[in-house]
Amino acid sequence: MSVVINDIFRKKAEELKAPLIERTVRPERIVVTEKDKDAFQGISVIKKGDAAFPVEIKNDEEIIFDFGDHFVGYLNISLGNDGLKRITDSPLKLLFTFGEFPLEIVTPPEEYKGGLGNGWLQNEERSYVFLPCKARLDRRYSFRYLKIRRTDNASFPVKIEDLSVTAVSAVREENAPVPRTNDEIFRKIYKMSVKTLKECQQEVFEDGPKRDRRLWIGDLKLQAMTDYGIFRNLDLIKRCIYLFASATGEHRMVAPCIFPDSPPYVDEWTFCDYSLFFISCLYDWYRNTGDISLVKELYPVAYTQFDVIKERFIRKEKRIDLNCFIDWCPELDKSTALLGVYIYALKQLKELAELLGESAEAVKEEITAAAEILLSCFDEKTGLFVTPSGQISYHTQIWAVLSGVLTKEEAVSVLTAIKEYPTQFTMRTPYMMHYYIEALYNSELKKEALEFIKDKWGKMMSAGFDCCPEVFNTENQFESPYNAPEINSACHAWSCTPAYWLKKLL
Amino acid sequence: MSVVINDIFRKKAEELKAPLIERTVRPERIVVTEKDKDAFQGISVIKKGDAAFPVEIKNDEEIIFDFGDHFVGYLNISLGNDGLKRITDSPLKLLFTFGEFPLEIVTPPEEYKGGLGNGWLQNEERSYVFLPCKARLDRRYSFRYLKIRRTDNASFPVKIEDLSVTAVSAVREENAPVPRTNDEIFRKIYKMSVKTLKECQQEVFEDGPKRDRRLWIGDLKLQAMTDYGIFRNLDLIKRCIYLFASATGEHRMVAPCIFPDSPPYVDEWTFCDYSLFFISCLYDWYRNTGDISLVKELYPVAYTQFDVIKERFIRKEKRIDLNCFIDWCPELDKSTALLGVYIYALKQLKELAELLGESAEAVKEEITAAAEILLSCFDEKTGLFVTPSGQISYHTQIWAVLSGVLTKEEAVSVLTAIKEYPTQFTMRTPYMMHYYIEALYNSELKKEALEFIKDKWGKMMSAGFDCCPEVFNTENQFESPYNAPEINSACHAWSCTPAYWLKKLL
């Protein structure tokens, strides 16, 4: 599809690009993995010894280094041939496998059957013609564990003299505020969320540093919202908002994602909820910075989302005739939830219009009309919102609450009723869980919100994650939207919002 | 083993290092390989089309680029995603396989069973996270053919926008003198030899640019001898002689090879014939340059070879009790041939001593004694030299002739007799063939020398080689000293001497 480029916004985005902060980190220990039915995904990691260099590596030998925490960066390796007792008479070959979590390093790449291209598998074989040598892998990896296997089938001695990662991020973890609680679990969840936010903060707010590495607006909305209170990297937030404004398709909808290391490009598909979140990003910017100039400059882009989407709102069918994301939940009827998103975003647009002294009439009328239709989906018998196809999901209830069309009591009632209702359409991603927490918070169910965070993110923590994963289902530890759990991202931006909520709730 | 370093020589060697000459070359055509029982090693290469970029590559597709000639250098690749019709939503993965000859690119690496480490196999898989991109492989390869296979299992479109090699050498091929003949075969053999000499001329005289990439003194002797009349790269010759002088083992013998990209290192094993060739290298230097200063400076190193080796000469057993190379010929009794090498080198040492006004008495006495023992190996019945174990080989006859202990008529008689004698111990490498040509030349059998070159190197040419191969046996096209013909070097310095001989003989 042709891309409509706004060069001014693009240039401003480029000017806001700052150099990354680098830090050199060495592995903490050498470990082995073991089958363990009680451990997450059936694998436990056992310490074998400290990572004290040099470390000898023989042909066909495998050594797993544990860096002790999650890092995003570039591997440096220094290789020697044991003080030249014998010469390297053919090139050394090493196979590197990086893993954010143990399953990733124990699953043979040839068994990969995922729906995404295998290029995201974090492994790479390199040869070193002459030793000793110092080398760096030029691909950036996201990992805690590094498995190195020697594959050259030669017998000369080789020692890994040193191993480090040049870790990169736009921010420094130590600059995050400390959590205001002595609850050990909450402190750890907070740390995990902050770490996730930091790891995903690179030249853009990436969705995940291991995979995709894209700027998604659904993720950006949550990252920015959290970051205002944590690292407050305003330049990066502004840069990302400009990037979304700088390139849209002919349809004039804001793209769901931007490919930061590509020439301007807009994919042919859209997510209508994500396009609406451009309004939310601007709204949050103003609320957190008081800076009206960016709002003024980008208001036309925000208003255009309304202009385009309202044309696709088929009122008599109670749905917007556009693709949307909502959640990774197969067979979910998203139509009523999307109405909630629509109202949620239009209310923010109305506030922005009033702030700028622009006419808000059309927006207000649309809110009224959409609210009426959304409310008509309420089913008195179940006390829940039902989609036109008759489906009752968590998603519909959450967005009905977030749209603000209910009183506090009605909202509490809906959120209580859905917990009792036997639906298969539950929240599948931490992304959707965030909106559940927001719905609980807006309904003044603060205790429930905290319990929910402690339960869900506490389990992620207990599973051994250092950061917040993209997918986490206690019922199915191998769940993967890509049919390959090893390719799931274990550090995913949309899961980082507990840092925001814990700051707000504690 | 401890290394005895001479820092002065090492420093001089470093000072003589010159930048390489770079040249950018693009592939000429796209080809396919076909089974063909009439072709060398059963494989023929068929043109499919010109290499006109961009070239689309789909998942699992294999494209073979033919660069039209042999090159040593670094691959540059420019990758695009077809004008961004669709985004690259996972990293592109390409498997590169470089080949000097077709067998190398059609043999699956997993079938490799060679004695050398598999690190010499010229293949490498790389991933490219974002497209479009320009990349360079940082390992130097030696090749004519490049097979690229896409392995990412994704469906987004990819185009190879450009492909080139930054070819490197210390010399320019066009600076070589033209051959003085209109004979088409000789002209081609000459070109092939010059090309080989050039390709092996890098920061040192390498044995082969694909494999080993080392400075071997047996190869250097022949390379330098040829180069005096071709590129006359005196600095590089001098640099290599200094390198050999700069690091010896405790045994004080010149090492058989130097690892140019390693700290000073001397392997625990030696080749006595190769150590003696240090004398030849100095001798040839003086004969070709008239420069006595280098001879004066390094004469002690040359004389030391005599000092050490004479102690291991067990006269009553008619052999020198040291390891030697002579040729890749299994079960060869090398003892008598080595006596020939010994006398050959000592005669050169004697001349150098006389030139410098040093005492040559001990050397002269040793020559007389060794000559007497060598001559005692002559068997009147067969008219050939026989080793103490009763073996009759080409090698023994050749080195008996080259030692100069025979009259011209005796030499002709021996060289004629060995052609009729049914021995399994024939010349196996072009390296040994060189000494056969030298023996023919010294015996004034110039016509035979030319015929031999035309026959042997002509067959290499007909087999499709662009340069002179390390191993070539018309009886066994798959012969390999490493039990893996695909790892043989198809551009090997010790096979380049026809350029020397054709200049001399035509």
Image (spheres, coloured by chain):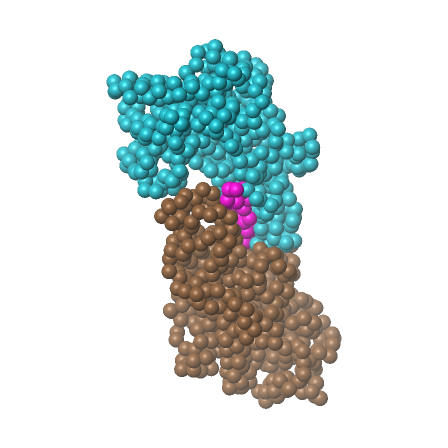
Chain colours: A cyan, B brown
Q: Residue at x 43, y 65 (%)?
A: B48
Which residue is nearer to you in this view: B67 or B279? B67
- Answer left or right for A314 relative to A84: left
Residue B401 percent across, percent down from the top left: 60, 81
**Quarter of the image with the C terminus of chain B in it:** bottom left
Residue nearest the observer in this picture, B176 or B33 = B33
Going 53% across and 36% down the picture, which residue do you hit? Answer: A481
Q: Position of residue A150 (x, y in %)?
A: 61, 48
Q: Is residue B256 visible?
A: yes
- What x and y, as percent, mark residue A284? 38, 21
Q: Is residue B177 left or right of residue B340?
A: left
Q: Which residues are magenta?
A: A115-136
B404 to A407, vertically: above or below = below
Is residue A230 covered in magenta? no
Residue B444, compared with residue B211, is above or below; it is below
Residue B305 visible in the shown view: no
Nearer to me, A362 or B161 = A362
